[in-house]
Image: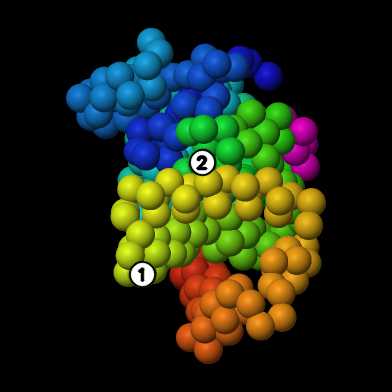
Amino acid sequence: MSNTLSFIGNGNMALAIAMGLKDDYEIEVIGRNSKNLDAFENALGKKIAKHPLKGFDISKKNIIFAVKPQNLLEVSSQLSGKAQSLYSILAGTTLKSLKDAIKAEAYVRAMPNMAASVRKSMTTLTGDSSLQEEALTIFNAIGTAHWLGSEKEIDIATALAGSGPAYLALIAEALTDGAVNQGLKRPDAMAIMRGLFDGFGTLIQDQHPALLKDAVMSPGGTTSAGYCALEKAGVRDAMVQAIAKANERAKALS
């Protein structure tokens, strides 16, 4: 595999992935707007090759396709040639749709999240098995990558890992607001919340969530009181429904 990755699209997720990969790969970016390409380069903090979209030849390129799903046909119609490999991060866009729109030797659907910029993405992958090892190498460079056996599974994983940072951000904000409501200064609440998430992120790697909960919850204690309030408010069901709705949307996009 060439050490150059060609990004088609220069949005927030493309930048997050490029930030995670820039030390290990040469980056080139293809887009419609030269000012946006310059802004991408400046944000990346590294000199990159920049190319206009119209007529760009993808022959023998390793492409990371990072446009909005609804722009697939518009963008692909402006490309020429046949790529070596195509890694798509378009939510809900099937391998068949990609194959119909863009010529490549092999295809992978990838769903990273915004933590790619700090090399902490949880990225799920599926597609042609010939690219499995290569795909895991690329996306492990921006965090943790996990290969799945079907597109049905990656749509569900998109709802969990791809959208999950937004759900956790809501929880983080709500916990902080709760502490402020009880009288804690917001800077102190924010600092404590960040420490909480940092420690929890390490603990959850080796322990089942139920065991973590049981270890903290003593009989008749403060955690038990708060936990019961969460259950009464339907927080568990809300999380289950969030995954269901996101999965429904992913399938609708396809």
Residue shown at 78% from the left, 57% from the top: 207
Q: Looking at the picture, does residue 199 appear above or below residue 32?
A: below
The numbered mark at residue 64 is none
Q: What residue sits right under mark 2 in the picture?
A: 115
Task: Give the crowd class for mark 1: few <14, some 14-19, many >=20 residues within 10 Å.
Answer: few
Residue shown at 47% from the left, 26% from the top: 19
Query: Could you say whether the residue bearing mark 2 is in a helix, strand or loop?
Result: helix
Q: Amino acid at mark 2?
A: Ala
Quadrant that contains the N terminus: top right
Is any part of residue 210 visible from this angle? no
Q: Residue furthest top?
A: 47
Horizontally, residue 13 falls left or right of residue 119, namely left
Badges 2 and 1: C-beta atoms under 8 Å apart? no
Stretch of the chain drawn in magenta:
129-134
Horizontally, residue 254 falls left or right of residue 8, namely right
Q: Residue 216: percent from the left, percent from the top? A: 69, 66
Query: Could you say whether the residue bearing mark 1 is in a helix, strand or loop?
Result: loop
Q: Residue 208: percent from the left, percent from the top? A: 77, 62
Q: Which secondary structure type mostly characterizes the magenta part of the structure?
A: helix
Q: What residue sits right under mark 1 in the picture?
A: 182
Which residue is at the front of the view, 165 or 172?
172
